[in-house]
Amino acid sequence: MTLSADRSGGPNRDSAAVEHFLTTPGWFAVCGEDSSGALVALPAFLVSGKPERVVLATPETDLPPNSGNEVDVAIVADEFASYEGIRGVIAQGVVVSTDEHRLHIDVVRAKGFSFANTLPDELRDERQE
């Protein structure tokens, strides 16, 4: 799997919100290819993070260990109290090292997303009645 750096668009949030998700301990999904080339998604907990590097703890590491080759991954975290309240971050990165069920990931790109104000006005009005 090769990550493309030339894509743009999609939902966006401010950099403070993205930084919040990449620095606050919480649950993520980490997605990548396993050693056979199959796509896998693993639950992972952010144990330490900066916007440019995160360390995620996983119950098991199905991603191939770093053997001189960097492994491309996507990571996603969200939180919500309602459909309209869904917000989160999706990031592309590279696993630069692994140790004891921890993935050290250099973040290449991150974007926030929010479902706030995504309903058409007529549906939003109906829900408020």
Image: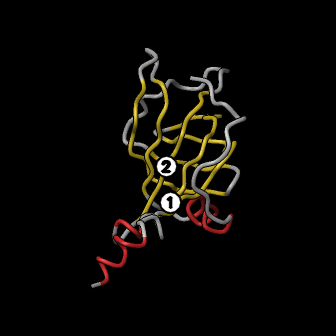
Question: Where is 66 relative to 20, above or below?
Answer: above
Q: Which residue is drawn at 39% across and 39% down?
A: 42
Asked if disc 2 and disc 1 are in contact, CB closer than 8 Å, the reply is yes
Q: Residue 101: x percent and y percent? A: 46, 39
88 relative to 62 in the view: left or right:
right
Q: Residue at x 41, y 66 (%)?
A: 119
Dot 1 alpha-carbon crowd within 10 angstroms: few under 14, some 14 to 19, many 20 or more: many
Image quadrant assignment for residue 125: bottom left
Q: Residue 17: x percent and y percent? A: 60, 67
Dot 2 alpha-carbon crowd within 10 angstroms: few under 14, some 14 to 19, many 20 or more: many
> Which of the two labelled residues, at mark 2 and mark 1, occupies the earlier sequence position?
2
Question: Where is 67 relative to 5, above or below?
Answer: above
Quadrant location of the C terminus?
bottom left
- 29 or 13, which is in the foreground? 13
Q: Residue at x 48, y 25 (%)?
A: 33
Q: Residue furthest bottom?
A: 129
Q: Name the residue under label 2.
A: 76
Question: Where is 6 relative to 16, above or below?
Answer: above
Circle 1: residue type: Gly
Q: Residue at x 40, y 68 (%)?
A: 84
13 relative to 41 in the view: left or right:
right
- 52 or 9, which is in the foreground? 9
Circle 2: residue type: Val
- The residues bearing labels 2 and 1 have C-alpha atoms spaced at a distance of 7 Å
Image quadrant assignment for residue 89: bottom right
Q: Residue 90: x percent and y percent? A: 55, 49
Q: Is mark 1 on a helix, strand or loop?
A: strand
Quadrant location of the N terminus?
top right
Q: Name the residue under label 1.
A: 88
Q: Is mark 2 on a helix, strand or loop?
A: strand
Question: Where is 47 relative to 125, above or below?
Answer: above
Q: Residue 63: x percent and y percent? A: 47, 28
